[in-house]
Each structure stands twice: as C-alpha cells, then as structure tokens.
Amino acid sequence: MQPNPRLVRVWFTMAVGRLHDPGADMASGQERDFASFYVNTWGRTVACAFAVTAELAAAEDCAQEAYSRAWSRWSRLDAYEDPAGWVRQVATRLAISRWRRTRTALAFLRRTRGLEDAAGPDENAVALAVALTRIDSKQRRAIVLHYLADLSVADVARLENCPEGTIKARLARGRAALIPLLDDTASSQENSHV
C-alpha cells in the first residue's frame, strides 16, 4: 500500500504550511528526506493503526496525524535509530485514543438514552432500492435525481451533462425496466403472506 507520490507532495506542502508547486522538487534536503521517509513507511504505519481501528479511513487519519507530528520533530527524529518505529507508535497510540473516546461516548449514550426501537424501512422502499440496483446506472441516476431528489428534467440534464431529451429517454427506459422488477417483488411478497 503506497501513497500516490503527487498526493505525498500535496500533503507535505500542507503539513509544512506553505504553498509549493506539487510538480516541483522538494526544496531542501530535509524535506526530501522526510518525503522519502513518508513514502517508504506509509504502508506499515497505516497497517499498525488499522490493527487497532479496523477502519481504513480512521487508520489513515491516525497515520497522517503521526506524520504531521513527526515533521515538526524531524530534525531530532532523523537521528533516531528507527524513526519509523516512532511514527508507528504515535499512529497506534492515536488509534487507541480514538477507540477509547468512541467507547466512552457510546457508553455515555447508552447510559443517558434508552435504546429506542426504530421502525424498519418500509417494504416498498426496500423493494425500490433493490430494483434500482438492477437497472442501468444512467437510468438509475436519472430516476433518483428526478423522482427522489425532486429535480426537474432540466436540472438533471445539467448535472448529467447531457441534453434534456436524453434524460427523458433514460427516465422512460428506467421506468420500463423497473416495472417488471417491482412486479416480481410485489408478487413474491404476496405469495409469502399467503
């Protein structure tokens, strides 16, 4: 798991706190060293945080924070025998702290709020959602934007970057494709209630 080199330069620019051309070479040797360190150690750092969080996005957030902290101390960390170990340790501790905060918040919510029974989704809504997954994606977008998001045909055409006539055709074809799918669902539900 290697980060995109261009994204590394953009992130590094943001971490350093100054504007920098993403395509240009890093200015100083220290910046180059840190950028190289970042690219070479990113995967293991995220993996360590992931082992605690079990969520990739949270693990990446912890790893990014660890690298931000490492950059502010890079002149000292560079002399460490294993600066990558320091970054992994920080990322892991951040992940543990995040887990503890989440656990504490959930415990508080359980104590202060009773478990409320939420009504399940309507059978028709579930059937429609399933049927929408089975039709062409362009037709699905047109139907969802027009009927569920309540956008006009002109607005949908603008969002989809195509003529209004194309949207009207997608709506007609999508409705035609949904009818047998919803009829099958309705008949299977009637048979299950008998």
Image (cartoon, rainbow, N blue to C red):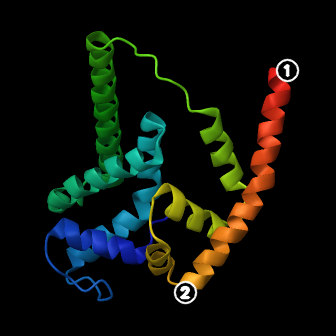
Q: Which one is nearer the viewer's eye here, 191 or 7?
A: 191
Distance from the alpha carbon under mark 2 to that under mark 1: 47 Å
Within the image, what quadrant is residue 36 found in?
bottom left
The residue depicted at 81 percent of the width and 30 percent of the height is 190
N-terminal-most mark, 2 or 1: 2
Position of residue 22 measured from the top left corner of the image (x, y, whole percent): 30, 83
Asked whether disc 2 touches disc 1, contact meaning CB atoms under 8 Å apart, the reply is: no
Give me the disc on residue 67. none
Res 31 visible? yes
Res 81 visible? no
* Mark 1 surroundings: few (<14), some (14-19) or many (≥20) residues within 10 A: few
User: In the image, is residue 124 above or below residue 119?
Assistant: below
Kindly identify the amino acid type of the residue bearing the numbered disc 1.
Val
Q: Which one is nearer the viewer's eye here, 20 or 115?
A: 115
- Would you name the residue on which mark 2 appears? 163
Is 151 left or right of 14, judged from the image as shown?
right
Q: Quadrant of the C terminus?
A: top right
Position of residue 5 measured from the top left corner of the image (x, y, whole percent): 41, 75
- Would you name the residue on which mark 1 appears? 194
Is 147 left or right of 166, judged from the image as shown?
left
